[in-house]
Image (cartoon, rainbow, N blue to C red):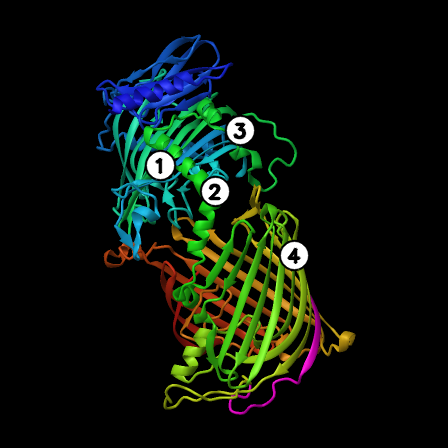
């Protein structure tokens, strides 16, 4: 049956040829009749080629003529065939296993394996090989397949077979995509890719998320795959310090195209180090890496996966070697969902002496136009470098036919009726949404659990809003949100209306407006969530949050000025009123605990913190991300994480007299920050440094002061800019200030060495924060802790100068 399917696939490949080109196709097997998957097939002395698929089938479009075709696979002898093509041709290939022997290899008297000297020479040549190609262009074909091979019958009460569209054994392809693109590279690290075609099974209007840059793995780098499958990354077998992590064994040598090739087994020195296992092939003259067949296991610290196999083959281009294909095969098991799959990249038509136009590398790392997903089936039959397997062909046919049904008015209406069906659980927990696909609008009702809260100013209170969104063409949209709030103790009703119009997704441009009244935290960064403050107030008789009333009107705009530079300006007018506690209700009266007043500076009495005043302010911010990269798609511009700092400059002015405004101040601030600075095997660091000054502080009421992100509670959300022990309110300022925050995450560098902790995959971290301003000079915090996924526990110490001011545990959750 399998041979019948393979033969039919070959016939399809042979029948569909273009008028100009001829299809060469076939099956690649070994001399025992076993399939050889992902073998390289290319024209001799060129970089024009393809790869077999997982079933060993290849297909190749060529002009009429005579060609020498090279068949190459890791572990097999290279095969050359001279073929004359005048019509579509099926040419099968049989590869013979390469024999690697130790004949002629000198074994040293000290008993050292000969592989060690070869690796030393490869390490010496590493930097030269890393930089010997200054720039290149290449065509790239990428195929990604993700399959479910086992799953529970139900998950949270939902039928998995129906939900994920699986067969009766709960198996099937979850995601299948293909893309072709032209990829450009220039040192140091400049990339640009333009997608030519894209196809996603069952999603005819979607764009593939394939990126050639995601498949780059260069073993000449010391550390590989950082911040992808593991935070720390993995040590290359030929890194500068490779002998600290690996042992090597020479399996044998063989001759290929007149040069000696060394087959070397790489063996971890320690079971749980972040290293590869497998085999690498190194030339005996130039010490180039010729092939790699390595894998990673859970022991190495990879996330989510059980095993990742990486196969990379190289092709000679002039005097160097460039990747001809790269294959990532993976499998894993998460909550009983067993999955596997692969991503394969095929490189062809290399040019290692390109001439790039001016501004070719302008930060845009990937460009996708509207036309890339409009290619028909005939285009893919003629241009797909790797033939589809029978399973993949069936998946395309079935899902594409289902996609036609799913885009019909009848189907979409039925789906919407089901998803729009009212449910009390939806309203209570997740919120209730009504969608209208054809009208391109939606109504989102807030979940009720976030709408009921308690504080000592308002008592029990309700806050509820509805968001109306209208979707326009090209990812433009606007939303309107009315919101109301009522406190049952202070009997105060407030309400507001806000609107946002996102009119240019490419420039990230928007206009916003809001007006009304509301109850706000005295610290504009916020202190605690309404739910968190409610729990502390009702159960522990501690009212951390302090509030004031604001009647306001705001208008603002934001847009990108140039790549990496964002501008935002907001004009605000408000009337601000001091508030006091109106209730002291609690569920349980705790001995030694009592509520404090709404004035953080006079906790025992309700003394007015500020008079009722009006404020007209203008707030302008410029944010520049150094080295900002982005992806351009038809539906917008998408920034990618930067490897360089972000600089933010802010100016805020309180305007006196105009519209009876009472405030009069000018404040400037500068902040520099960077996330996830790679430190190799030691993990990564992040920092934020900020400073500011009131150039004029003639009239600055408390809500207008510079506030800081403090913390008085045991449990909170993580934020690098947040102090662990600083009071929420007491150290705001209307003068100059400077603050600094630093954190280093060792990413298991230490805990991975402790057997009892290793399986928990804990990440150890240390950090420090610093603040100085006129009433709080040289305030410093130090902390250390452990983190796993979204949960963190840390113990810290706070110092006022040299005096220890506080210490204790802090827990955080979330991102």
Tell me the distance, in whole angstroms, between the alpha carbons under discs 3 and 1.
Answer: 24 Å
Where residue 551 appears, as percent x and y from the top left, is: 65, 76
Q: Is residue 661 visible?
A: yes
Marks 3/1 in contact by CB < 8 Å: the verdict is: no
Q: Residue furthest front?
A: 410
User: For residue 407, which numbered disc appears in the image?
Assistant: 2
Residue 361 occupies quadrant: top right
Residue denoted by label 4: 558
Mark 1 to mark 4 CA distance (whole Å): 41 Å
Task: Find residue 663 and report its horizontal and vertical position in percent.
Answer: 71, 77
User: Quick check: marks 4 and 2 in contact, CB under 8 Å?
Assistant: no
Against 693, residue 101 (above or below) is above
Q: Earlier in the sequence, mark 3 or mark 1?
A: 3
Determine which residue is flagged by label 1. 342
Check the image and report above or below for 560 versus 522: above
Sequence-earlier tag: 3 or 2: 3
Q: Residue 617 vs residue 345: left or right? A: right
Q: For the residue labelled by badge 2, is the local secondary structure a helix, a strand or a loop?
A: loop
* Helix, strand or loop under label 3: strand
The quarter of the picture where the C terminus appears is bottom left
Give the magenta part as a residue range: 601-620
Q: Nearer the viewer, mark 3 or mark 4?
A: 4
> Magenta segment, principal secondary structure?
loop
Q: Residues within 10 Å of mark 3 (few under 14, many from 20)?
A: many
């Amino acid at each position: 049956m399998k041979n019948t399917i393979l033969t039919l696939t070959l016939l399809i490949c042979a029948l569909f040829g273009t008028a100009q080109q001829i299809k060469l196709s076939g099956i690649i097997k070994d001399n025992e009749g076993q399939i050889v998957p992902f073998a390289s097939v290319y024209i001799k002395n060129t970089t024009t080629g393809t790869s077999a698929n997982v079933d060993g089938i290849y297909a190749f479009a060529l002009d009429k003529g005579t060609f020498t075709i090279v068949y190459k696979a890791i572990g097999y002898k290279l095969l050359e065939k001279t073929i004359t093509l005048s019509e579509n041709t099926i040419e099968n290939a049989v590869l013979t296993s390469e024999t690697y022997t130790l004949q002629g290899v000198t074994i040293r008297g000290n008993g050292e394996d000969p592989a060690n000297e070869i690796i030393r020479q490869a390490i010496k040549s590493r930097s030269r090989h890393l930089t010997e190609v200054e720039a290149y262009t290449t065509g790239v074909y990428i195929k990604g397949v993700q399959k479910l091979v086992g799953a529970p019958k139900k998950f949270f009460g939902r039928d998995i077979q129906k939900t994920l569209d699986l067969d009766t054994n709960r198996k099937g392809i979850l995601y299948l995509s293909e893309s072709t693109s032209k990829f450009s590279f220039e040192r140091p690290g400049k990339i640009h890719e333009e997608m030519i075609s894209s196809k996603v099974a069952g999603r005819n209007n979607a764009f593939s998320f394939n990126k050639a840059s995601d498949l780059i793995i260069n073993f000449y780098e010391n550390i590989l795959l950082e911040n992808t499958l593991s935070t720390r990354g993995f040590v290359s077998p030929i890194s500068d310090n490779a002998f600290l992590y690996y042992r090597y064994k020479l399996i044998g040598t063989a001759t290929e195209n007149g040069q000696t090739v060394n087959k070397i087994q790489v063996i971890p020195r320690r079971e749980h180090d972040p290293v590869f296992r497998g085999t690498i092939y190194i030339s005996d003259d130039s010490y180039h890496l010729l092939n790699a067949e390595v894998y990673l296991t859970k022991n190495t610290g990879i996330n989510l996966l059980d095993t990742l196999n990486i196969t990379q083959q190289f092709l000679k281009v002039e005097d160097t070697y460039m990747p001809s294909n790269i294959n990532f095969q993976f499998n894993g098991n998460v909550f009983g969902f067993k999955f596997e799959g692969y991503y394969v990249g095929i490189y062809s038509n290399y040019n290692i002496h390109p001439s790039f136009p001016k501004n070719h590398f302008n930060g845009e790392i990937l460009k996708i136009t509207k036309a890339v997903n409009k290619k028909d089936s005939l285009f893919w039959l003629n241009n797909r470098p790797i033939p589809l397997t029978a399973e993949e062909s069936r998946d395309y046919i079935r899902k594409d036919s289902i996609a036609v049904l799913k885009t019909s008015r009848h189907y979409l209406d039925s789906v919407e009726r089901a998803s729009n069906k009212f449910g009390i659980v939806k309203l209570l927990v997740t919120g209730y949404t009504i969608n209208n696909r054809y009208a391109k609008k939606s109504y989102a009702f807030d979940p009720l659990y976030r709408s009921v809260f308690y504080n000592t100013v308002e008592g029990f209170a309700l806050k509820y809003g509805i968001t109306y969104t209208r979707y326009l063409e090209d990812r433009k949209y606007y939303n309107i949100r009315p919101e109301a709030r009522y406190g049952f103790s202070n009997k105060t009703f407030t309400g507001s209306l806000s609107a946002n119009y996102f009119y240019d997704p490419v420039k990230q441009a928007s206009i916003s407006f809001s007006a009304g009244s509301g109850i706000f935290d005295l610290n504009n960064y916020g202190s605690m969530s309404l739910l968190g403050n409610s729990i502390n107030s009702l159960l522990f008789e501690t009212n951390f949050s302090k509030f004031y009333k604001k009647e306001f009107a705001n208008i603002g705009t934001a847009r990108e000025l140039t790549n990496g530079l964002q501008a935002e300006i907001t004009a605000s007018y408000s009337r601000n009123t001091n508030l006091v506690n109106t209730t002291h209700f609690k569920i349980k009266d705790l001995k030694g605990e009592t509520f404090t007043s709404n004035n953080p500076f006079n906790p025992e009495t309700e003394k007015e913190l500020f008079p009722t005043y009006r404020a007209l302010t203008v707030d302008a911010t410029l944010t520049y991300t150094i080295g900002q990269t982005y992806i351009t798609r038809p539906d917008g511009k998408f920034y990618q994480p930067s490897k360089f700092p972000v600089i933010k400059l802010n100016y805020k002015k309180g305007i006196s007299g105009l519209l009876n405004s009472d405030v009069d101040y000018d404040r400037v601030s500068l902040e520099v920050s960077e996330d996830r600075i790679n430190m190799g095997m030691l993990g990564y660091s992040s920092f934020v440094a900020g400073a500011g000054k009131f150039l004029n502080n003639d009239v600055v009421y408390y809500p207008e002061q510079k506030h800081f992100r403090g913390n008085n509670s045991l449990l909170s959300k993580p934020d690098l800019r947040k102090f662990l022990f600083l009071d929420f309110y007491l150290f705001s300022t209307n003068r100059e200030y400077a603050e600094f925050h630093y954190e280093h995450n060792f990413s298991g560098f230490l805990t991975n060495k402790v057997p009892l902790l290793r399986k928990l995959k804990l990440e150890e971290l240390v950090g420090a924060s610093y603040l100085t301003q006129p009433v709080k000079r040289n305030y410093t915090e130090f902390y250390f802790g452990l983190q796993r996924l979204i949960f963190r526990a840390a113990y810290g110490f706070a110092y006022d100068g040299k005096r220890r001011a506080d210490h204790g545990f802090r827990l955080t959750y979330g991102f």
